[in-house]
Image: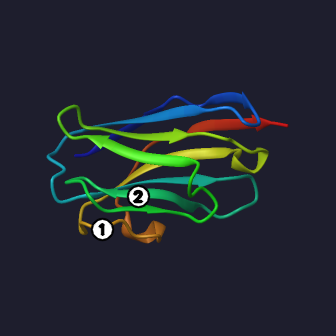
Amino acid sequence: QVQLVESGGGLVQAGGSLRLSCAASGRTFGSYAMAWFRQAPGKEREIVAGIKWSGGSTYYADSVKGRFTISRDSAKKMVYLQMSSLKPEDTAVYYCAADSHSLYPSRSTREYDYWGQGTQVTVSS
């Protein structure tokens, strides 16, 4: 069984930074793809960034390119999302997700079989 636990969300002013963390446990993740998604009120869940657990390939949504960085620490089984130059439109619940069937992160929520409980990020203007 895989468990994902997010932390690091909070309230920040526009232009500020936050780092989200995702603690993974339960299995080895060498062949997994990991991703951060977000969901704002009234909107569909969308991918923010993804990464191969084994390292190398990353994906970013156009809306966050140049502002967000995804990384992982395989020894600690942690995935991070460093968010900078935050905007009010980044306000959402952020979720960590794991896809056990693919090395490369997919943009589709349907591909991910494990999800964390989410952490709220609120950016004030």
Secondary structure at numbered mark 2: strand
Secondary structure at numbered mark 1: loop
- Left or right: residue 61 versus residue 89 is left
- Taking the spot 62% from the left edge, 32% from the top edge, the residue there is 17
Farthest right residue in view: 125
- Residue 97 at x, y = what percent? 40, 52
Farthest front residue in view: 66
- Taking the spot 70% from the left edge, 28% from the top edge, the residue there is 11
Q: Reading the chain from its start, which is encountered first: label 2 or label 1?
A: 2
**Colour option used:** rainbow
Quadrant position of residue 87: top right
Q: Amino acid at mark 2?
A: Gly
Contact (CB < 8 A) between labels 2 and 1?
Answer: yes
Q: Amino acid at mark 1?
A: Tyr
The residue under label 2 is 50
- Left or right: residue 63 versus residue 56 is right
Q: Closer to the camera, 11 or 59?
A: 59
- Taking the spot 67% from the left edge, 46% from the top edge, the residue there is 92
Quadrant showing the C terminus: top right
The residue under label 1 is 104
- Residue 2 at x, y = what percent? 26, 45
- Neighbour class for label 1 at 10 Å: few (<14), some, many (≥20)? many
**Whether residue 67 is situated above or below residue 56 in the rendered picture:** above
Q: Closer to the camera, 19 or 94?
A: 19
**Whether residue 50 is situated above or below residue 6 in the rendered picture:** below
- Neighbour class for label 2 at 10 Å: few (<14), some, many (≥20)? many
